[in-house]
Amino acid sequence: MSAVATSGGTAVQVEMAGISNGYIAIGFSDDQTMGNDDIYICGLGSNGQLQIQHAYSTGRSSPSILSLGQVSNVITSLNNGVISCSFTTLNLISTQRSIGSSSPYYLMLVYGSTSNGNIQVHTKTFVSSSAANISSPGVVSTESFPPIVKAHGSLMLIAWMTTGSLGMIIAKYLKGMAKGEKCAGKDVWFVAHLSLMILTVAATSIAFILIFADVRDWSGGAHPVLGCIVMILTLIQPTAAIFRCGPTDKWRFIFNWSHALNALLIKVLAVAAIFTGLIWLDNTDNQWLVKVMGGFVGWEALLYILLEARRWWKRKDVTNGGSNSTNVELLLLGLFFIGNLCFLVALLVGIGSQ
């Protein structure tokens, strides 16, 4: 994309091009966050032809379409999926704090799909790392995602790939770990499970607060909806555990089943939220971050299969007078943690590079 003010400063020449199946758009902003931005959209209209639209965003919802105004020299093309547009505008650039081409603006470039000529939520966003004064042309680099978005994604990965997964596995398969030994008056397995799940709730809460404080609305497709549900269910889990009845109470089975089912639901929704988040975040051509996450899901599924097989075999062995040792489960947990760490590091490095 490029935006250059004419010698007299009365007009701005705009050019933009990119691969898209619907539209591309350039925005002039006072900051690196969507909202109060002057926008020009080049996208497919209801007739299937490219058109230029002038718009203004008041938040993270769909921008308001304005009168095109004094726009001329429009040239558009769609070739092999690449949308290209150039035009000259005499409209004054206007944001919440700045007016005219002599003020510095952050430049935004987004792309996404259209439906009957109406733009949908953008697929990707590129924002210049510094403000540019278009009356004095210079090259600016793009910053795809702010650090707060990367921190959000990293915390969610740590919570639901590592601490949450380990905590759930310990509670389900390792209750016999260090049998008879206590820590702070509690069974060792329970202390390990509780510690890991506290870390999971804390990481999830911090991640949610960070992104919600930055975005400040619920738009953005399935990902924020899934994230909000995960956050609500995550807070319900420890709250219900605090008020649970005693181990020997006749209604204890209700808590046990609801606690386990809620944990499973959270896990499924968290993984779905991570997938949708990585699809949105991954700027690579082959979406390798999504593939790595798929590999992790397969790795965790394999562990559960092995642990279930081990539990079935141990029950059979104990019935025949065999040992009830948890050594095999601990070995499998150790192998899972090593593999888990490899997947996690790969994804964290990938997020940091976006």
Image (tube, grey):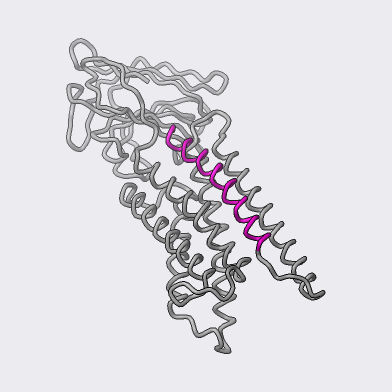
Q: How many marks?
A: 0
Horizontally, residue 109 falls left or right of residue 113, namely left
Relative to 149, say whether 29 is above or below: above
Relative to 182, say whether 275 is above or below: above
Residue 95, by quadrant, is: top left
Relative to 112, say whether 239 is above or below: below
**Looking at the magenta stretch, what is its main secondary structure?**
helix
Q: Which residue sits furthest top?
A: 7
Residue 322, by quadrant, is: bottom right
Relative to 78, say whether 252 is above or below: below
Name the residue located 29 percent from the left edge and 20 percent from the top edge.
Answer: 89
x and y percentages locating residue 213 in the rendered image: 31, 51
User: Does the segment drawn in magenta span residue 203?
Assistant: no
Q: Quadrant of the C terminus?
A: top left
What range of the chain is rendered magenta? Answer: 327-354
Query: As rendered, which of 346 and 272 lies closer to the eye?
Result: 346
Name the residue located 56 percent from the left edge and 42 percent from the top edge.
Answer: 343
Query: As rendered, which of 181 and 297 lies closer to the eye?
Result: 181
Query: As rendered, which of 8 and 167 lies closer to the eye?
Result: 167
User: Does the segment drawn in magenta span residue 335?
Assistant: yes
Q: Quadrant of the N terminus?
A: top left
Q: Which residue sits furthest bottom?
A: 250
x and y percentages locating residue 184 in the rendered image: 43, 74
Residue 177, by quadrant, is: bottom right
Horizontally, residue 309 falls left or right of residue 149, namely right
x and y percentages locating residue 21 in the rendered image: 53, 30
Name the residue located 44 percent from the left edge and 46 percent from the top edge.
Answer: 153
Query: As rendered, which of 104 and 172 lies closer to the eye?
Result: 172
